[in-house]
Image (cartoon, rainbow, N blue to C red):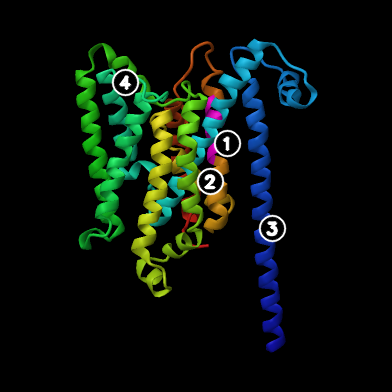
Amino acid sequence: MSYGGVSSLQEFRRNVAKRELLRSVLLVVLAVCLAAAMVGATLVGPSRVHVRQLVRLLQSPVTGTDIPAQDRRIIVQVRIPRVLMAVCVGCALAASGTAMQAMFRNPLASPQVLGVSSGAAFGAALAILLGLRIVSQLSATVFSAFCFALVPAGVVYALAGHPRMTSRASLILLGVALSAFFSGLVSFVLYLADERLQSVVFWLMGGLWHSDWTRLGFAAPFVATGVILLFLFTDEMDILAFGDRSARDLGVPVERVKKILLVGAALATAAAVSVAGVIGFVGLVVPHIGRILIGANHRYLLPFSCLAGGLLLLGVDVLCRSLIQPLEIPAGIVTALFGAPFFAALLLTKGARTGWAQ
């Protein structure tokens, strides 16, 4: 009996090690695919850029060679910021969606569940309606969207410790109520918009056409801070999957962890929505794909979501600016058109296997 028990334990350890190796390999492959996609996306656009031009640009600090000023401007000032912005926003939305689904134990939770997107939409719409000018080299629309995005997140954070708001359902319902409230304010702004209506609606559709180094420099630190906060609590996310009572029995300070996850997800989402508008389904679909491919262990699921979210939005952006050149389709439209049926098919075919246990 004892020898059989030792053999079974060794086999179990080998299976665990094999599974972790496969997960690590999948993450490395995904990272390589993302890097290759970033290079490919830099070459795609109305003005064709060849690989050799990109290579010469990267080699110029060492070799002293240079490329034409127009090609340099297209690559450095237009393509690279846009590619990095797509990866940054996709990473933020997917990581936030993963954290929200873990915290609420709800497969329908997404970055929009806190009302952050609706708050940002109202802030941007208000700035456009009032014709606010640039704020210290940053678009007033971006600044206003970011500030108002944090308002519903702050309300949820402040009430998260209330005795009647400790349940997951209460927080979700509060987020839904705040989202509906700010959506109503957006509708009121649209009613008053008149000649600025097109600008407001265009921003609400979501897209990366305004990407530049200034916006990237504003969003990236907040996204990085939020995502790093989430990475620090991957083990706690796993334990929360077993319920609040079990988590407390295992020594997890549940309410404090919830607030930290709220802060991390809100920072990342607010920064992403403020610079790219409302882009849905990335934070909803990517975590589900990750659970199918890599499992529910957040130590692997969260980095998978970051990489896959960046890759997904980068691919969507390339599609948006390539389908009907020289026009560009808003990214929010494409993610909704493809994300909704894909998510429905995912639930129908894999729903029974997208559980929360490891």
Circle 3 SS class: helix
CA gap between label 2 and label 3 equals 18 Å
Report the amino acid beneath label 2.
Ser
**Disc 2 designates what residue?**
305
**Disc 3 designates what residue?**
21
Numbered-mark total? 4
Q: Position of residue 11 (x, y in %)?
A: 70, 72
Q: Position of residue 134 (x, y in %)?
A: 36, 21
Q: What is the magenta range?
A: 309-317
Circle 1 SS class: helix
User: For residue 241: magenta?
Assistant: no
User: Secondary structure of the magenta portion, mostly?
Assistant: helix
Give the residue displayed 49% in from the left and 37% down from the top.
220
Q: Position of residue 352 (x, y in %)?
A: 47, 55
Residue 117 higher or lower than 303, as above or below: above
**Disc 1 designates what residue?**
311
Give the residue displayed 46% in from the left and 28% down from the top.
215
Mark 2 is surrounded, within 10 Å at the Cα level, by few (under 14), some (14 to 19) or many (20 or more) other residues, namely many
- Residue at the outermost right position: 63
